Image (cartoon, rainbow, N blue to C red):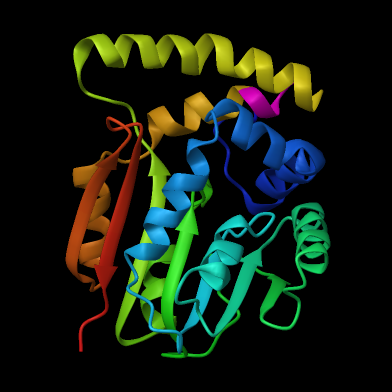
Amino acid sequence: MISSSLSKTPDRIARMFDAIATRYDFLNHLLSIGIDRRWRRRAIRSLSLTGRERVLDICTGTGDLAIAARTARPPAARVVGVDFAAAMLRVGHEKLRREQLTDTIALVRGDATSIPAADASVDAVTMAFGIRNVENTNAACDEIYRVLKRSGRLAILEFSIPTTPGLRAAYLWYFNQILPRIGRLVSRHHAAYGYLPASVGAFASPVEFVTVLRQSGFIDISAVPLTMGIVFLYTARRSA
């Protein structure tokens, strides 16, 4: 959550996440009651890894999804995480050193709309809670398609707003009233924890985002609701 403004220029989003980098992981686990770890494991399982793949994690942040790909059973052979927030990457590098994963996971600075990877160079692409922060969603999906090998797989996690009436009301109350207050108290960043509810509410619906993926050329697209529709797991494949 970042501010009432929904400006998504790369510099602004990077500054916002840099400001909360040291508290980011703690808040993720606290505000989701630890369920975020389960969502990430589910995303990696959807890739059906064999142990030979090279995985690219876009908007990697502090590297949690990249780590999940490398520590899965079987794991990705090699993982590269890309993010444009330097402080988030510094936190991620510390985690890799602690977990002795620096030989198999690389974190590099880059933009989701201009991915620093060659055409058809990776077997799978992942992204967790980052696509709604990208200024040009269509350009990011086009870039993901470009770097994937033929038949390469995609897994994207993103927040959504539940549609069940009672649950929707309770969720919106928590999301708009409680979560921002906890986030501001812990992170000490006033603006950041106003952005999340606004950005989730403004992001494409599952049907609309599936259309974006289809327009980029993806096939076998699915949108699976997790935890009663609080999060969606989008999976797709580049055509062969």
Q: Which SS type dominates the magenta stretch? A: loop
Identified at 62% across, 28% down, the residue is 30
As rendered, which of 145 and 155 lies closer to the eye?
155
Image coordinates of residue 116 in percent, x first then y, are: 60, 80
Q: Quadrant of the N terminus?
A: top right
- Left or right, 148 with respect to 19, comes to left
Quarter occupied by residue 219: bottom left
Image coordinates of residue 73 in percent, x first then y, are: 46, 72
Q: Is residue 225 visible?
A: yes
- Left or right, 169 with respect to 69, comes to left
Image coordinates of residue 99 in percent, x first then y, are: 75, 65
Identified at 42% across, 63% down, the residue is 44
Identified at 66% across, 69% down, the residue is 110
Residue numbers of the magenta segment: 189-193
Q: Is residue 233 above or below residue 35?
A: below
Q: Quadrant of the C terminus?
A: bottom left
Q: Is residue 211 above or below residue 146?
A: above
**Residue lying farthest to the front in this orientation:** 73
On whether residue 206 falls in the magenta region, the answer is: no
As rendered, which of 1 and 65 lies closer to the eye?
65
Identified at 48% across, 59% down, the residue is 127
Q: Is residue 143 visible?
A: no
Count up the numbered dots: 0
Image coordinates of residue 206 in percent, x first then y, are: 24, 43
